Image (cartoon, rainbow, N blue to C red):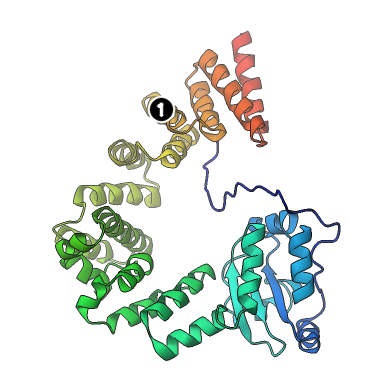
């Protein structure tokens, strides 16, 4: 199966949400006309800021907007509107409200002032919850931002930064500034620690460097496994940035930082660097060996990585030794998570290795699993046809 990227895989139960023939009644007038209507009706605009290519936008339009409960709520309490952010006046609206992810839902008053915002697809109840927050004087995004800036209290900071995260806003600099103003010992406090762990992703950030230099003290007060994972994530992020920047000395600086840190997983990070470097440079002489080293040492419990890397090898090489490794990973993924995608990958690799009877049994199982979960199994059915042709020879 092609690489599986679980962007927003939502298993929904629509029980209790009847479908409406009309759904949400979106106003398709100009932005000026939409604001004027909101002002006249004393309502907020609920703007679906979308693009034509956005998958989650289409999912919302197909599955959520038509629901009677959702439609009744938004038609009654808001002026719903839809504008493509890449066409016409949508381009300027996207700039004004800093729309960078799709879909973004903007709740704006009749004067054009932003009151609330969220981004991404939502289940029906969560989507209506966002509307209720927009109408709440103490839960909307604008209030939480104002309250944080005026009080600076930990509870206000947590509420605002969490809301900003829900809105896909980049607030790492704001969080960094907030934490930098704290006394070092205050970083151990739960609220500040949570902000550090969730939002700080740069290895040179003072809060992060304080965390790693006081590792023993932090692990005495907080979960060691979480801190270890945070350290690993921050450094891998920095490694990727350094390699993609292609600036001389950037990678050396990152490597120097984690190698000087007593509790950094140096072998893991070195192996990750080799793998990422091979991927970015597309150096096939290094690529397969680097992927094998990293996967076998660190990813054998990661179902998605096993499936993705097995498919990657299936697509990129005819080398039997590498395909045998892909077979091993694909089989392991089916044992860890016996789902359609993993069995499809396994069948494809077996087919490429010429193991046609095993490939047929595996492809058949993949199709059965896919149909059971209403998944598109056309590619696997095509593979099964190819396998049957080989078995006839």
Residue found 35% across the figure and 60% down from its top: 237
Q: Position of residue 2 (x, y in %)?
A: 55, 39
Query: Closer to the camera, 367 or 228?
Result: 228
Along the horizontal axis of the image, is 330 left or right of 208?
Answer: right
Count of labels in the image: 1
Query: Closer to the camera, 196 or 30?
Result: 196
Query: Closer to the camera, 112 or 251?
Result: 112
Residue found 34% across the figure and 36% down from its top: 300
Q: Is residue 105 visible?
A: no
- Residue hosting label 1: 319
Along the horizontal axis of the image, is 363 left or right of 202?
Answer: right
Q: Position of residue 185 (x, y in %)?
A: 20, 76
Name, please, the residue furthest toward the right: 21
Dot 1 crowding, Cα within 10 Å, few <14, some 14–19, many 20+ = few
Along the horizontal axis of the image, is 27 left or right of 188?
Answer: right
Split into 4 quadrants, where in the image is the N terminus?
Answer: top right
Name, please, the residue furthest toward the top: 393
Residue found 34% across the figure and 40% down from its top: 299
Q: Is residue 7 visible?
A: yes
Relative to residue 15, is residue 362 depicted above or below?
above
Q: Position of residue 79 (x, y in %)?
A: 77, 77
Q: Secondary structure at mark 1?
A: loop
Split into 4 quadrants, where in the image is the C terminus?
Answer: top right
Query: Closer to the camera, 109 or 103?
Result: 109
Q: Residue 256, located in which quarter of the rendered image?
A: bottom left
Q: Position of residue 387 (x, y in %)?
A: 60, 18
Name, please, the residue furthest toward the front: 16
Q: Residue 125, located in which quarter of the rendered image?
A: bottom right
Relative to residue 299, is residue 33 depicted above or below?
below
Relative to residue 226, is residue 370 depicted above or below?
above
Residue found 65% across the figure and 78% down from its top: 135
Along the horizontal axis of the image, is 100 left or right of 135?
Answer: left
């Amino acid at each position: 199966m092609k690489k599986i990227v679980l962007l927003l895989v939502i298993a929904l139960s629509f029980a209790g949400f009847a479908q409406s023939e009309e759904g949400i009644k979106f106003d398709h007038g100009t932005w000026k006309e939409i604001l004027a209507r909101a002002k006249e009706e004393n309502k907020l605009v609920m703007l679906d800021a979308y693009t034509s290519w956005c998958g989650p936008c289409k999912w919302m339009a197909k599955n959520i907007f038509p629901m009677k409960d959702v439609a009744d709520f938004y038609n009654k309490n808001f002026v719903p509107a839809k504008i493509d952010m890449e066409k016409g006046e949508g381009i300027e609206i996207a700039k004004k409200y800093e729309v960078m992810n799709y879909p973004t839902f903007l709740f704006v008053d009749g004067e054009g002032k932003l009151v609330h915002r969220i981004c991404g697809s939502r289940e029906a109840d969560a989507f209506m919850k966002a509307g209720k927050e927009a109408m709440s004087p103490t839960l909307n995004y604008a209030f939480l931002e104002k309250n944080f800036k005026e009080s600076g209290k930990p509870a206000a900071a947590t509420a605002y930064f969490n809301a900003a995260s829900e809105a896909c806003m980049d607030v790492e600099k704001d969080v960094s500034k907030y934490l930098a103003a704290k006394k070092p010992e205050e970083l151990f406090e739960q609220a500040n620690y949570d902000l550090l762990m969730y939002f700080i992703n740069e290895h040179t950030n003072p809060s992060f460097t304080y965390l790693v230099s006081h590792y023993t003290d932090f692990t005495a007060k907080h979960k060691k496994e979480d801190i270890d994972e945070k350290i690993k994530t921050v450094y891998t992020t920095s490694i990727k940035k350094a390699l993609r920047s292609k600036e001389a000395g950037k990678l050396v600086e990152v490597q120097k930082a984690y190698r000087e840190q007593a509790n950094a997983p140096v072998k893991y990070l070195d192996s990750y660097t080799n793998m990422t470097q091979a991927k970015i440079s597309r150096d096939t002489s290094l690529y397969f060996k680097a992927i094998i080293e990293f996967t076998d040492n660190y990813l054998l419990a990661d179902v998605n990585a096993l499936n993705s890397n097995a498919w990657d090898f299936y697509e990129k090489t005819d080398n039997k030794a590498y395909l045998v490794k892909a077979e091993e990973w694909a089989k392991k993924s089916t044992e860890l998570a016996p789902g359609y995608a993993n069995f499809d990958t396994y069948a494809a690799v077996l087919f490429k290795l010429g193991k046609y009877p095993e490939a047929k049994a595996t492809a058949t199982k993949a199709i059965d699993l896919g149909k059971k979960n209403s998944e598109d199994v056309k590619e696997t059915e095509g593979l099964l046809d190819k396998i049957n042709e080989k078995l006839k020879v």
